[in-house]
Image: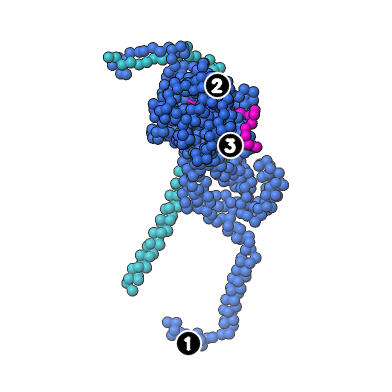
Amino acid sequence: MIASRLPVGVANFSRGRQWFVVGILSLGMAVLLGRTFQVQILNSPRLQAEGAARQLRSIAVKPARGRIVDRNGDVLAVSTPLDAIWAHPPTLVQSVADRSRLADALGMSVNQIDNLLDRYQDREFVYLRRHLPPAEAARIERLGIAGVSSLREYGRYYPAGPITSHVLGFTDVDDRGQEGIERAFDNHLAGIEGRKRVLRDRKGRVVADIESIRPVYHGRDLQLSLDLRIQVSAQRHLAQAAHEHHAAGASAVMLDVQTGEILAMANVPDFNPNKRSDISGERFRNRSVTDVFEPGSTVKPFTLSMALASGRFSLDTPVSTSPGIHYVGGWPIRDVHDYGELTLSGVLIKSSNIGTTKIAMELAPEELYGILTKVGFGQLTGVELPGEQGGSLLKRERWRPSEHATLSYGYGLSSTPVQLARAYSVLASGGILRPVTLQRQHRPVAGQRVLSAHITRQINFLLEKVVSLQGTARRAAVPAYRVAGKTGTVHKPSPTGGYEEDRYQSLFVGFAPASAPRFVLAVMVDEPQGKHYGGEVAAPAFAGIMADALRIYGIRPDAEVGSGVTIVSHTVGKETGA
Amino acid sequence: MKWIAFLSLLTFVSALAVVVVRHQNRLEFREVRAAEKLRDRLNDEWGRLQLEQATWSRHNLVEQAARQELGMITPEPTDIVVVQLEAAQ
């Protein structure tokens, strides 16, 4: 064995062979050290870059945002796949020729690209263009420019454009909800970004997907209570009313009486959510939930329902409104005309401020405050939209007689269009207050009884008279249907206190068909020029929208004989199966 | 000593299993990705078709077609006949 032969080797020991071996080993060592030096010190930056270029990387997987559809499944908002073009600045900066080719393809100037690269020179990532159609992005990728690649993202598109603009809101360039439903339901719609590990080549392109690190959860769809068909009608009639009367704005809200679902919510002016430059503060405000106004005469039915509920008044209780002006605590209250002797019914049908005040002064302030609170004035409706205003309703401890009086005919408190529609849904539903919602309800919604059916029946009978030849709102009538409602014409509060002499808001709120109410609709026209009475400005828009809704839903005409509708009875035998 | 050998063997087998499973995982991930890509492509196409449908079914387009091409009108009250169904006795 070796151990036994060692003495022989020692005996043959030669200095030359020793140096030879040491030399070889040293040379080998020197080569290794040199190579190490070359790789670690001299070539380090290049090799690191090369290595990084072929590295396994983890990249984000963007979730697709859920769709928003209306109650019938019509698409209101949908995300379409788009591509962003991005660059790796340290790579792209190396080739001038590439940059000019890229600039041509992107429709940018070389200068613009150079500026971007300069600004992001220390970064690994810079967006060059966002939201490109996939075909165009593919064309740019095919140029094969080192350091440039595309990233899948999603763009939001609203097929109905301006018609649903205020309700839906919009998203920013990164697909996050900024306003309206898009913002309120952002978590539901957005989904959760995933990550995956990929192998990239030298040009930064993904060569292969290696594994999933975290799965991507795409956003969920959302079904709204809106009916696009009614929404279209509402937007059209509002635009027409605003145009005809040179109004500063207008809003309309329609609710389903039985569920509290919002079927339409429209505002003028509107904007095109598909055009980013169109989105400016003044236009994208959803006036139906953010703008408060004094509801004026539209509050009178609630004052009078309280009077009826107290048992001290009936529909025939006489009230004198002469001589057309009446003072409470030194505060003058006026009617448009001197209506003379009226009954409680007449007070509502003619919309007499004096009559309403005289009746209200017989009631305790608590009773008036109680009924207005119960039907939702001064409270948020709970609609799922950001920035909802609750309006104001003064606490009763602070009421003076003049406030008690003005409150009874709708001044000194404020309300949004959606609050007003909700308050009238109490009358329409026979006394039930329901939460207002923009989400489709699939089963009946329980509400809270705030007025007796007996009282609402009497008030509704009067509200139907308002929309008749003797009332203030003939123009709210819908052929073949019975309509109930109330007008309102209010002076706008002046920013300096008091009221503006010649700036008005025209209101009409009501429901149909009056025999079995299905839809409640509130219409507000802001600052009409010329004509300003609710019955002339807001009522025609109301009639137009209501007529469309009744027709679309195929509601059976309930008008009395004389409306022109023919009613025939058809007897169905057992054999026909009905 | 025997135990150590046995445990080493187990460790070795387990290590091999890890390698195999990882490899399988990657293969299957690739398959999943292919399926997902197909799904995404179909989803994208569906989105485009929905947009197309929404664009063609725009209410003013439909209304225009109904009124002008098909000559449809909104019925007047005098044109409406309500048929009440009554069950035979």
Q: Is residue A303 above or below residue B18?
A: above
Secondary structure that dominates the magenta span: strand
Viewport quadrant of the C terminus of chain A: top left
Q: Which residues make up the magenta segment?
A: A496-510
Name the quadrant containing residue A137.
top right
Taking the magenta stretch, the answer to whether it contains residue B3 is no
Do we see residue A161 in this rendering? no
Instruction: For mark 2, give the secondary structure.
Output: loop
The residue singled out by tag 3 in the image is A285
Q: Which residue is mark 2?
A: A322
Q: Is residue B32 above or below residue A17?
A: above
Q: Could you tell me the amino acid type at mark 1?
A: Pro
Render colour scheme: by chain
Residue A420 image point, x, y percent: 50, 31
Percent position of residue A261, x then y: 45, 32
Q: Using residue A131 as the reference point, say whether residue A263 is left or right of it.
A: left
Viewer-side residue, A11 vs A494: A494
Q: Position of residue A446 (x, y in %)?
A: 39, 35
Q: Residue at x 59, y 29 (%)?
A: A332
Residue for badge 1 = A7
Mark sitting earlier along the chain (3/1): 1
Nearer mark to the viewer, of 2 and 1: 2
Question: How packed is label 2: few (under 14 Cα within 10 Å), some, or many (20 or more)?
Answer: some
Q: Which chain is blue?
A: A
Q: CA distance from mark 2 to mark 3?
A: 43 Å
Looking at numbered disc 2 in the image, what kind of residue is underneath it?
Answer: Ser
Q: Upstream in the sequence, badge 2 or badge 1?
A: 1
Crowding near the residue tagged with mark 3, few <14, some 14–19, many ≥20 C-alpha atoms within 10 Å: many
Quadrant holding the N terminus of chain A: bottom left
- Marks 3 and 1, Cα distance to the nearest angstrom? 102 Å
Q: Check the rendered structure and report the hue given to chain B.
A: cyan
Residue sitting at x 33%, y 74% = B1
